[in-house]
Image: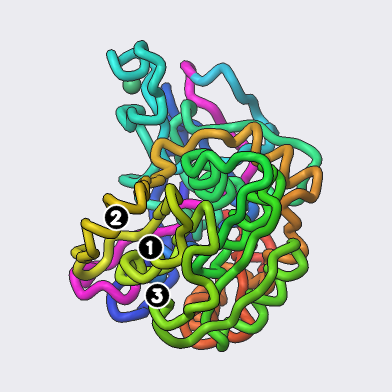
């Protein structure tokens, strides 16, 4: 069978093409009709990465409907609404058996498939399919980035009454604001560039105190030594200045995308004498989907605040450029492949 799929390459080029999928899924795979797929910061980084000069499929924040299943796929059936884990744990290796499934990425995933989330149809391993109900597809496809925010807040280990600064008001940062408040933070500040006006508005709507800031945080003396936690979702170059924001014994939790030079330096004496801590969050494998689906359904993570733009698959190029050029109005862009009448070309 044939599917329409979007391909991406540097610099910021997309094109729609038709690719062949097997008529019947492999025994451990399922055919998914994509209903919604979010554009992620990773996609934008890839578009801007000079090393990504060959065409490849993309889109990993996927909600869809199971259309066919392979013989070994038993957890879902025809018509099940699913979200796709962007990577999964295997359940059988020694790391998994020791109870740290969060450290295993050995299960099959969909990253090598000829069509990914920005497609009408795609194949995916059965192990990555998580059934859902009671959500729109555009809300459900936020499960993947919501899992990233969830992992970050869980990694931070916020205690009741602690103060939190979220630096970087992208979708992950905004969801981290909501989850940090739910975790018991007494106050959450959201710090972002002044041009991210709409994102800061959403942060305020989610309960954060907003702090627009266009200079170095090293100069923001009113914020220094103020927070028990900093959750950094902005480029890693901001890490050293964010350490200034931590109170004695404070913890900085970082999630980032490895693009460009990842080296930073900071004053180890200050780090030592103030008993600071540094933690990395990386939601791969993608876990906690059952939790985040409930948080999305219960409006703790409000899709109406988060999704600012919805576009059809044929407008994928416009969708990507919106993310690049309209930082003042874009929060999260979701592509709805079913919305443009260009369903499967079977
Ligand atoms: Zn993502
Ligand atoms: Zn494993």
Q: Residue at x 19, y 64 (%)?
A: 263
Residue at left 75%, top 56%?
302
Earlier residue among tags 1 and 3: 3
Q: Secondary structure at mark 1?
A: helix
Q: Depth check: 55 or 151 in front?
A: 151
Number of numbered tags placed on the structure image: 3
Give the CA separation, mark 1 to mark 2. Answer: 8 Å
- Could you say which is closer to the camera, residue 298 or residue 6? 298
Q: Earlier in the sequence, mark 1 or mark 2?
A: 1
For disc 2, the marked residue is 271
Residue name at image x 76 percent, y 50 percent: 136
Between the C-alphas of marks 1 and 3, the distance is 39 Å
Query: Do the residues bearing badges 1 and 2 touch, measured as CB atoms within 8 Å?
Result: yes
In percent of width and height, residue 100 lies at 38, 22
Residue 124 x/y as whole percent: 45, 37
> Which label's residue is closer to the chain start, 2 or 3?
3
Residue in front for this viewpoint, 121 or 166: 166
Query: What is the magenta range?
Result: 47-72
Whether the residue carrying mark 1 lies under 8 Å from ligand 1 is answered with no
Badge 1 crowding class, 10 Å Cα cut-off, few under 14, some 14 to 19, many 20 or more, is: many
Name the residue carrying label 3: 14
The residue that mark 1 highlights is 243
335 on left or right of 152: right
Q: Residues within 10 Å of mark 3 (few under 14, many from 20)?
A: many
Q: Is residue 68 magenta?
A: yes
């Amino acid at each position: 069978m044939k599917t329409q799929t979007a391909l991406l390459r540097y610099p910021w080029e997309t094109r729609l093409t038709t690719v062949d999928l097997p008529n019947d899924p492999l025994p451990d795979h399922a055919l998914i009709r994509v209903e919604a797929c979010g554009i992620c910061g990773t996609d934008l980084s890839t578009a801007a990465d000079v090393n990504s000069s060959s065409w490849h499929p993309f889109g990993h924040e996927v909600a869809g409907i199971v259309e066919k299943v392979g013989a070994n796929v038993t957890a879902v059936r025809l018509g099940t609404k699913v979200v796709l884990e962007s990577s999964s744990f295997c359940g059988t290796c020694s790391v998994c058996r020791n109870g740290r499934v969060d450290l295993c990425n050995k299960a099959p995933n969909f990253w090598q498939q000829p069509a990914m989330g920005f497609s009408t149809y795609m194949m995916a391993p059965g192990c990555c399919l998580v059934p859902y109900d009671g959500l729109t597809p555009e809300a459900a496809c936020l499960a993947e980035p919501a899992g990233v925010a969830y992992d970050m807040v869980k990694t931070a280990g916020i205690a009741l009454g602690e103060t939190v600064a979220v630096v970087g008001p992208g979708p992950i940062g905004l969801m981290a604001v909501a989850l940090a408040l739910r975790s018991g933070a007494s106050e959450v500040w959201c710090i972002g560039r002044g041009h991210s006006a709409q994102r800061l508005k959403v942060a305020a709507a989610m309960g954060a105190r907003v702090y627009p800031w266009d200079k170095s945080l090293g100069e923001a003396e009113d914020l220094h030594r103020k927070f028990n936690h900093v959750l950094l979702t902005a480029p890693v170059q901001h890490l050293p200045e964010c350490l200034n924001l931590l109170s004695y014994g404070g913890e900085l939790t970082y999630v980032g995308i490895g693009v460009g030079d990842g080296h930073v330096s900071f004053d180890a004496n200050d780090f030592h004498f103030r008993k600071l801590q540094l933690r990395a969050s990386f939601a791969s494998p993608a876990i906690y989907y059952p939790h985040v689906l409930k948080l999305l359904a219960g409006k703790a993570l409000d899709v109406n605040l988060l999704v600012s733009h919805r576009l059809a698959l044929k407008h994928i190029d416009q969708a990507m450029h919106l993310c690049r050029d309209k930082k003042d109005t874009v929060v999260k862009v979701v592509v709805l492949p079913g919305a443009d009448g260009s369903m499967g070309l079977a």
